[in-house]
Amino acid sequence: DAGVIQSPRHEVTEMGQEVTLRCKPISGHDYLFWYRQTMMRGLELLIYFNNNVPIDDSGMPEDRFSAKMPNASFSTLKIQPSEPRDSAVYFCASSFYRAKYEQYFGPGTRLTVT
Amino acid sequence: GDSVTQMEGPVTLSEEAFLTINCTYTATGYPSLFWYVQYPGEGLQLLLKATKADDKGSNKGFEATYRKETTSFHLEKGSVQVSDSAVYFCALSATGRRALTFGSGTRLQVQP
C-alpha cells in the first residue's frame, strides 16, 4: 500500500492567496483526520471525517479554513485568504474503524505564507 | 478538557544509554494512550499503545505502562541507538472519541 499521500509537500504563497492542500487516505480506511503542527501550538486536530462526513470541526481556526471530502479517496483543506500565521506543517491521517487506535499519517505539507 | 504533558526536550544521550521520556495526562473516563514517533521529514508513526490501566505497550525495545493512579505513561528503552533519534509524542484518545490529543513532543538525540 502506498500509505497516506499528501500534496504538495511544500507550498510557499503570499498573504491573501488561496491555498489548497490535498490528501489521499489509505484505501479502505473510513476515518480521515487533518492536523496542524506549529512550534508554538504543537500538533492540533483541525477536523475529522467518518465515511466522508465531517464529525468534529471544532479545531478549525476560523471561517478562512474549510475542508471537504467528496469521496472516500480524496480530501482537501482550503485556506482562503491565507495569512502568515497559517504557516505550519499540515498532516493528514487515516484509520480503519476496526483498528480504531492506530492512525496512519501522511508526510505532511509544509506551508509558508509570506 | 483533555491534555497531555511531556517533558521538555531535547534529550541528548549517548548510544546504549537508558531512556525515559515522561508523559502525564488529564482526561475523564478511561482514555487509550499512545506513543508516536516522528523521524525527520516524515509523518508520525504509531510506536506503541495501551488501552487500559496497567497495560504495558511495547515495540522495538520501547515500553510504556499505563498508570492510572499517577495518570502517567512514561516511555522507556534500555539501550538507545543512533537510529532512535527522532521526536516522540505522547497522545491520548478519550473514551468514545476517535481523535487524538497530543503532547508537545520530545526531541531525542542519540550520539555515537
Image (spheres, rainbow, N blue to C red):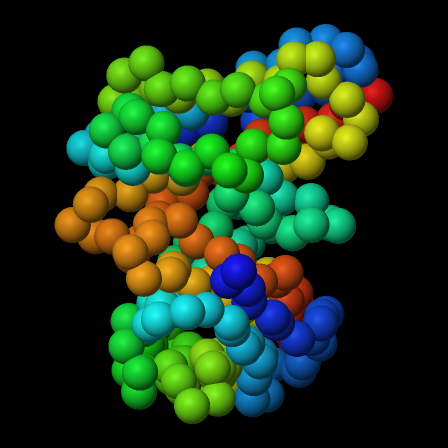
Coordinates of residue B62 in the picture (x, y in percent): 42, 78
The image shows residue B25, relative to residue A32, as above or below, that is below
Coordinates of residue A13 in the picture (x, y in percent): 74, 15
Q: Is residue A2 visible?
A: no
Given the current orientation, which residue lies at the most extreme right position?
Answer: A114
Question: Which residue appears at 43% of the width and 63% of the height?
Answer: B92
Given the current orientation, which residue lies at the most extreme top position?
Answer: A17
Coordinates of residue A40 in the picture (x, y in percent): 75, 50
Question: Which residue appears at 59% of the width and 39% of the height?
Answer: A36
Question: Which residue appears at 78% of the width and 31% of the height?
Answer: A85
A78 horizontally vs A87: left or right: left
B58 horizontally vs A39: left or right: left
Q: Is residue A85 visible?
A: yes
B67 horizontally vs B38: left or right: left
Of B85 and B70, which appears nearest the observer? Answer: B70
**Number of callouts in the render?**
0
Coordinates of residue B4 in the picture (x, y in percent): 55, 67
Q: Quadrant of residue B57?
A: bottom left
The image shows residue B13, relative to residue A44, as above or below, that is below
The C terminus of chain B, quarter of image = bottom right
Question: Which residue appears at 49% of the width and 56% of the height?
Answer: B101
Of B40 and A17, which appears nearest the observer? Answer: A17
